[in-house]
Amino acid sequence: MNKRKVFELRRKGLHDMEDIAIQKQHLKLKLTARERLNILFDEGSFFELNTFAEPAKAIKKNQNAYGDGVIVGRGLVQGRSVFAYAQDFTVMGGSLGYTHGTKIAKVQEMALKFGAPCVGLIDSGGARIQEGIHSLSAYARIFQNNVKSSGIIPQFSVILGPAAGGAVYSPAMTDFVIMTNKTSYMFVTGPEVVKEVLNQDITMDELGGGNIHAEKSGVAHFVFEDEEHAIVQVRKLLSYIPLNNFDALPVSTDISFNEERQEYLNKIVPDDTNRPYDMKEIIHILVDNNSFLEIHEKFAQNIIVGFARLDGKTIGIVANQPKVMAGTLDINASVKGARFVRFCDAFNIPILVLEDVPGFMPGIEQEHTGIIRNGAKLLYAFCEATVPRITIITRKAYGGAFVVMNSLGIGGDFNFAWPTAEIAVMGPAGAIKIVNRTELAAATDKVSLEKELVEKYKDEIANPFKAEELGMIDDVIKPSDTRKVLITAFDILSNKQYAQPERKHGNIPL
Ligand code: HXC
């Protein structure tokens, strides 16, 4: 047949995928790969590659195999270059064979070479069974590319269907995992294997649905009701971050903020130091209007992480949340914080820490599951970060947690405290029981003495003026001045230089 005719016919086939397959996909409340790419990219900007790829000849079936089940190429997001692959479940369940895997690897390699983010829209039955080991080697190349790209270009995985077995590792190594709560799931072994090996009954959703991964495992940074919101989230995230580790941060021209609410910061911290308040309120007041984009919102809620803009410029925020577990740092919070700090550092995003932390979480469960090893991840991440780093201590900053949360001692560039700050080795209740043990044992009115000693400790030891006197912080500031102080301080740090001896890489406690 005439080559031009073949081209037209096949091009037509590609764009009108078999109706039944599309209907099946829609019935599952899922979109097709092309519909998804249309949401991700600016209209008409998608530039497809390897459109006519087909499965390896040996296993070629007489069926719809267009593109070998994956669409790859480059498009624009808000006019910026982004590479993507979208697995097409209508073609052999989006399973990954040699050609399919090679297409993904190629687009990853182009993204890395041309310094643009890479987005995976994942909907796949995993390794294509008929292609055996060829599928596995294609996966291996994808994993290797994930790691080669890590810290050089941002990588996103949007899970819009199954991701099972080894297929979960590529998403796990990318910077952001986004799921839907009804149509996507991720697990290393599915419910059938769980039943066979452990005799436990569990549904796919309970085992690895979007909500589970957003709330319990922390694998998913975001979970959404539908695919459209999940994909749009990539566009939102991209508006805060650079295209690669040498690219400048995007700057917004909208620098509006809530001027009237700044005064409220002077009274937001309750007089009773054990009463909670919402750190997110402080964040919203400090940053540009509507600019806070929280990450991992449902996981380890005792710590808050996310991007925001301050005077139009992107910052990463790490904040203790006194409303949840009094803001104590446990294993999950430490790991969540550490991963975010490392992302910000890799992509040159300045970090703001808002601190109100009574300490690390005590207890047998935490000790036995590794709070030492995991808490050290957060410490390590802050210690090694070379981006501008500022801490505001709003209230408690006790013990190791004071040091960990970006103190001057571990390389924080500026530490400021509000007058309500309590900075010391430990909280007053614990401290007086050790320091004043004999006095307390001999006291007739123990309660009054305890009260008196606590006040004395707060006045003489655990206060921000003492910390400033000793050079542990840079200044005590009026809470309503915080935004102004931060804008100036980040400006001072905008040309921060750093140098350290060459090494292959550090050895973060994993
Ligand atoms: C080949 C596959 C396939 C696969 C699905 N299909 N998965 N073909 N290899 N891995 C095909 C089906 O045969 C079917 O073809 C079409 O895709 C749609 O699948 P359905 O089963 O009809 O869809 P659904 O009911 O929605 O179920 C989806 C599914 C199920 C849950 C993903 O297909 C499934 O369990 N597939 C196998 C999953 C799996 O075990 N994969 C290997 C994981 S191990 P027809 O022609 O009927 O339309 C792995 C190792 C990677 O990935 C290691 C990397 C290091």
Image (spheres, rainbow, N blue to C red):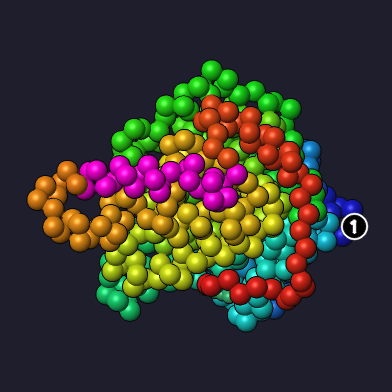
Of residues 184 and 1, which is closer to you in this image?
Answer: 184
- The location of residue 343, given as percent across then percent down, is 63, 56
Instruction: Name the amino acid type tagged 1.
Output: Asn
Q: Seen in the image, is 291 located left or right of residue 239? A: left
Instruction: Assess whether residue 97 is covered by the magenta stretch.
Output: no
- The location of residue 429, given as percent across then percent down, is 28, 51
> Helix or strand or loop: what does disc 1 sit on?
loop
Instruction: Assess whether residue 463 is covered by the magenta stretch.
Output: yes
Q: Compared with residue 382, is residue 250 higher up or lower down, i.e. above or below?
A: above
- The location of residue 91, given as percent across then percent down, is 62, 59
Q: Which range of residues does the magenta coloring cover?
A: 450-474
Image quadrant containing the N terminus? bottom right
Give the residue drawn at x 83%, y 56%: 114
Q: Can you identify the residue that label 1 sits on?
A: 2
Q: Compared with residue 29, is residue 217 higher up or lower down, i.e. above or below?
A: below
Q: Compared with residue 175, is residue 16 higher up or lower down, i.e. above or below?
A: above
- The location of residue 6, given as percent across then percent down, is 83, 56
Q: How many labels does the image show?
A: 1
